[in-house]
């Protein structure tokens, strides 16, 4: 199983980024799939997750407040995180995750830096 995250970078506050996660060896309909982040201030925390396999039930972290949108395409097996109105507090490493059959799979992370 491989999860390849990309799309991070340096952006000014108020800007946008779109993260991508390409999955191989596992389907993005296999279990809960989503994005997590690790920031300087906190341990790894939930950003957004599809709660169940192929469903549309989504949970967002409280800090998201409508700024981020998670999506996925089953045909290409890719997951996205559209992030708008970014804040310096969003700076961190963003990881994609698949939780399937009691196993967590993690991508390598992509760094997001938001300057004030």
Image (cartoon, grey):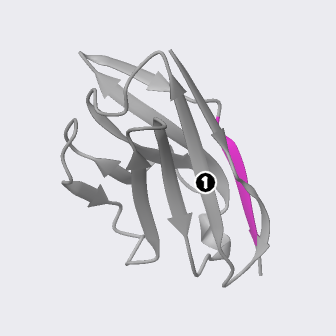
Quadrant containing the C terminus in the rendered view: bottom right
| Residue 110 painted magenta | yes
Q: Which residue is under mark 1?
A: 19
Q: What stretch is highlighted in magenta?
A: 109-114
| Residue 107 painted magenta | no
Report which quarter residue 21 is drawn in.
Answer: top right
Decide which of 45, 22 is in the foreground and name it. Answer: 22
Residue 15 screen position, x and y as percent: 69, 80
**Label total for image:** 1
- Magenta segment's dominant SS is strand
Residue 23 screen position, x and y as percent: 51, 29
- Compared to 53, does 13 lie above or below? below
- Compared to 20, does 98 lie above or below? above
- Compared to 89, does 71 lie above or below? above
Residue in the picture at 38% in, 22% down: 104
**What is the crowding at mark 1: few (fewer than 14 residues within 10 Å), some, or many (at least 20)?**
many
Residue 106 screen position, x and y as percent: 51, 27
111 relative to 103 in the view: left or right: right
- Compared to 52, does 12 lie above or below? below
Report which quarter residue 88 is drawn in.
Answer: bottom right
Residue in the picture at 56% in, 76% down: 84
Residue in the picture at 22% in, 44% down: 51
């Amino acid at each position: 199983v491989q999860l390849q995250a990309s799309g991070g970078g340096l952006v000014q506050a108020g800007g946008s980024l779109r993260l991508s996660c390409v999955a191989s060896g596992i389907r993005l309909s296999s279990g809960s799939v989503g994005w997590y982040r690790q920031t300087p201030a906190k341990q790894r925390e939930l950003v957004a997750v599809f709660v169940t396999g192929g469903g549309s039930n989504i949970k967002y972290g409280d800090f998201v407040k409508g700024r981020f949108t998670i999506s996925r395409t089953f045909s290409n097996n890719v997951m996205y995180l559209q992030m708008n109105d970014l804040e310096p507090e969003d700076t961190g490493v963003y990881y994609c995750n698949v939780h399937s059959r009691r196993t967590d799979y993690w991508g390598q992370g992509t760094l997001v830096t938001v300057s004030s």
